[in-house]
Amino acid sequence: MKLGRLNHIGVATPSIPDSIAHWRDVMGATKIHEPFDMPVQGVKVCFVDTPNTQIELIEPLGADSPIHGFLAKNPLGGQHHVCFEVPDIHAAKAEFEAMGKKVLGEPRIGAHGTLIFFVHPKDMGGMLTEIMETPKEAH
């Protein structure tokens, strides 16, 4: 597996508006995208551009959201995952599985509109890792 571009760092938050204020007022972010709901995944998402990647702010839409459980353990929020790009999502999934890594579910459409999957933190040095097919318009 060849390490691809870091696409974003996912940050769980109890409040996207509060997090936007932090990234704008404390960190100096100038490009903050409009938040949007992803009901299928149970989250609201907002991307903050940085000079070399993005921060994905993730807020639960309800008590059944996977982010809700993360925030129960980490009430202030925090780093949830890292996301790397790959040219072919299905080949990447097969490679991770061939290495014995636990892939969490089948590839599905993520917040960038491209296919994604996650690899369990226990198999990735303690980090939940999102693998994302490189958006076609990006390269």
Image: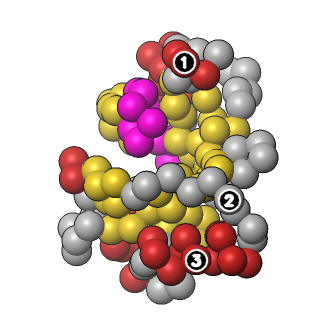
Q: Earlier in the sequence, mark 2 or mark 3?
A: 3
Label 3 neighbourhood size at 10 Å, few (<14), some (14-19), many (20+)? Answer: few
Q: CA distance from mark 2 to mark 3?
A: 11 Å
Q: Would residue 71 be visible to someone looking at this image? A: no
| Residue at position x 36%, y 73% in the image | 69
Q: Is residue 30 above or below residue 100?
A: below
| Residue at position x 58%, y 77% in the image | 21
Q: Examine the image and state in which quarter residue 16 appears.
A: bottom left
**In the rendered image, which quarter contains the N terminus?**
top right
Residue beneath disc 2: 30
Q: Examine the image and state in which quarter residue 60 appears.
A: bottom left
Q: What is the number of the mark on residue 21? A: 3
Residue sitting at the far bottom: 75
Q: Are marks 1 and 2 in contact (CB under 8 Å)?
A: no
Which is more toward the observer, 122 or 127?
Answer: 127
Type of amino acid under label 3: Ala
Left or right position of 65 against 111: left
Left or right position of 50 against 81: right
Residue beneath disc 1: 137
Secondary element under disc 3, as helix, strand or loop, is helix
Type of amino acid under label 2: Thr
Which is more toward the observer, 72 or 77?
Answer: 77
Which is more toward the observer, 62 or 94?
Answer: 62
